Amino acid sequence: AAGAPAKDGWALTQLAHFPSDAAAVRLAELVRAWPDENKHKRAAAGLAVLGAMGTEAALRALHGLSEKLKFKGLKDEAGRRLTAAAKRLGLRREQLADRLVPDLGLGAPIVLDYGPRTFTVEADEHLALRVTDGTGKVLKALPKPGAKDDADAAGEAYRRYTALKKDLRTVAADQVRRLEAAMVAARTWSVPEFEALIAGHPLNRRLARRLVWWTGTGSAATGFRIAEDGSYADADDARVALPADARVRLAHPVLLGERTGDWIALLTDYELLQPFDQLARPALALTDEERATGRLARAEGAVIEAVRVLGATGQGWQRAKPEDAGVEPGLTWSPGNGLMVAVALEPGIWAGAATQSPDQTVRSAVVSRGEPCWWFDERRPPRPVDLDPVTASEILARLERLTTSGGGPAA
């Protein structure tokens, strides 16, 4: 299928009828490569086949493509295919993604056999591989096979370790990013989902133990962590019980309020290094006018060096498509849940000579649902925006980082 002419596309589509894990992995590799060979249509057909396969391996590959393809059109198409697959299963896209997180066989220690000697491999609390020898001594890494080892067994074991190390690094990075995005988007989990897919997952639970979680509403709301024995405890180390109908989300300084410092102290005492900067984030709030109009007037008039505008893409901002005279009119960022933050710039970035563009002045900054329009001005009718306090704080913090010389965590 990879080298077949276009008229023989059936060779690709037939994979949907005879799916295998190996075929899904190989097809994902080809979908990544084909656009560089000007085979965008074939890549799109490959995405359709992965969606039609419907196996866990195929959907996992499709999810990876929806997150990391460098061509936006194909990346969006992968996302649509994944959303459709989730809908068929009665799930939202992010719920399906939770269920696709592999455990890599690390739910229990893995024994690697070299013949005359064996080694045990398991994931540590930081999702790195810990290797011990037959005496229980911790090694820096799995040693390469030696002359006295069984050549076939040791070679296979070493290859397995190398692949596992690479896969674990990828899964860990992806999950840290997903968890931070879930916090920004104010995503919640049911208790059964949380306990099965987060607290009970062999890999996710290692990340989750180093984060602070939140449940309840009003005076009954509380932060909690996952203790060493798997129970839940608050900032005073008192046990927390989760009602069966509760919702769980990641905590944020906006929610924790004055207890944020207590949590920082507790995690420090337990030497729990957070996988992302959760508790040192600013707690900001929209003004009544911003909430009523969706217009973030605090940013208007800010002057930003063009090089900083270009660098903002490394923090999740997207440059707008060029319009008249090849000028990019601004930046956008989506915190999830269909929200879009659009920052209109004057005079705009010169697409053909971006680094030579002059300093940019923020003409407007607007948060809304859906794709942005660049004619936001004083004639735009007010559009109230209903934002979760955490999402609102994250939008304002990101906007502040863009318009000032300060820095900070970026989801």
Image (cartoon, rainbow, N blue to C red):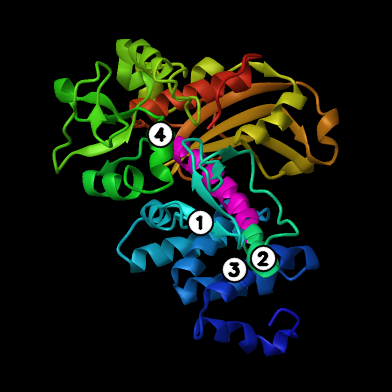
Circle 1 packing at 10 Å, graded few (<14), some (14-19), many (20+), is: some
- Identified at 43% across, 16% down, the residue is 268
Residue type pointed to by label 4:
Met
Type of amino acid under label 1: Val
Query: Which residue was labeled with disc 1?
Result: 111
Would residue 185 be seen by someone viewing this image from the given angle?
A: no
**Region rendered in magenta:** 160-183
Q: Where, quadrant-wise, is the N terminus in this rendering?
A: bottom right
Main SS of residues in magenta: helix
Q: Amino acid at mark 3?
A: Val
Q: Is residue 9 above or below residue 308?
A: below
The residue where tag 4 is placed is: 183
**CA neighbours of label 4 inside 10 A, class few (<14), some (14 to 19), many (20+):** many
| Image x and y of residue 253, in percent | 38, 19
Q: Earlier in the sequence, mark 4 or mark 1?
A: 1
Residue kind at label 2, given as amino acid type: Asp
Disc 2 residue crowd, few under 14, some 14–19, many 20+, Cα 10 Å: some
Identity of the residue drawn at 68% across and 49% down: 143
* In front: label 2 or label 1: 2
Residue closer to the observer: 19 or 118: 118
Q: N-terminal of the two: label 2 or label 4? A: 2
For label 2, the residue is: 150
